[in-house]
Amino acid sequence: MQVDVLCKLCGNALKTVSHALWGYSKLKSIRLNCGMMSGVERVDELAFLDLMLLSSSRLSRAELELLGIVLWKVWFRRNRVIHGGSLLQHEEVVGCSYRWKLSASGSLKLNVDVVLCVDKQLMGVGLVLRDHSGLVVRAAA
Ligand SMILES: [Zn+2]
């Protein structure tokens, strides 16, 4: 059995989490547009765990959450291309204009996400209820 160890997109790097989510050369503009790691030399060479450790010491909670969203979108974008879909533009991945906002003091905020799998007739729902400080009060799926 042959094991594919090279990146399916560029074919010239090992298939690692660091490469897929952060180091891949074509992610440079995403890394720059995101701006969260500006001033860090050779940021594209960081191992994923080092990126997470550095991020947790440099970024605010909101920025960390945004970084998580960006990394998820990079992963989604990558898998979409590998499975024959079209390439998302970098602006669609970074989307730094989006900011989750806390609810007003004394109130709760409910975020809901739904996934549909029409061909299998399945549906999933996720719910997160947070207080005005961002603390999770309840979560369900
Ligand atoms: Zn690659």
Image (tube, rainbow, N blue to C red):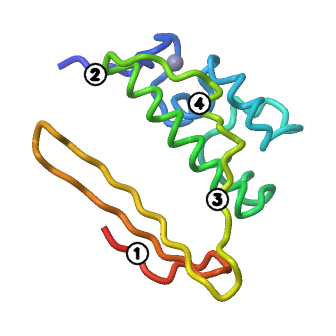
Amino acid type shown at disc 2: Val
Q: Is residue 17 above or below residue 98?
A: above
Which of marks 3 and 1 precedes in the sequence?
3
Measuring from the top left, give residue 97's x and y in whole percent. 71, 43
Task: Report which quarter residue 47 is drawn in.
Answer: top right
Q: Residues within 10 Å of mark 2 (few under 14, many from 20)?
A: few
Nearer to me, 19 or 113: 113
Residue shown at 51%/23% (left/top)? Answer: 88
Q: Quadrant of the C terminus?
A: bottom left
Q: Position of residue 129 (x, y in %)?
A: 48, 76
Separation (CA) of disc 3 from disc 2: 41 Å
- Closer to the camera: disc 1 or disc 3? 3
The picture places residue 101, in percent across and down from the top left corner, at 67, 64
| Residue, disc 4 | 92
Tell me the residue that label 2 is attached to: 3
Disc 1 from disc 2: Cα separation = 39 Å
At mark 3, the secondary structure is: loop
User: Answer yes or no: do the residues labelled 3 and 4 have beta carbons within 8 Å?
Assistant: no
Q: Residue at x 48, y 32 (%)?
A: 16
The alpha-carbon separation of the residues under discs 1 and 3 comes to 17 Å
Residue assigned mark 3:
100
Between the residue at mark 4 and the residue at mark 2, the CA separation in whole angstroms equals 32 Å
Q: Which residue is mark 1?
A: 139
**10 Å neighbourhood of mark 1: few (<14), some, or many (≥20)?**
few
The numbered mark, 1 or 2, whose residue comes first in the sequence reads 2
Callout 1 secondary element: strand
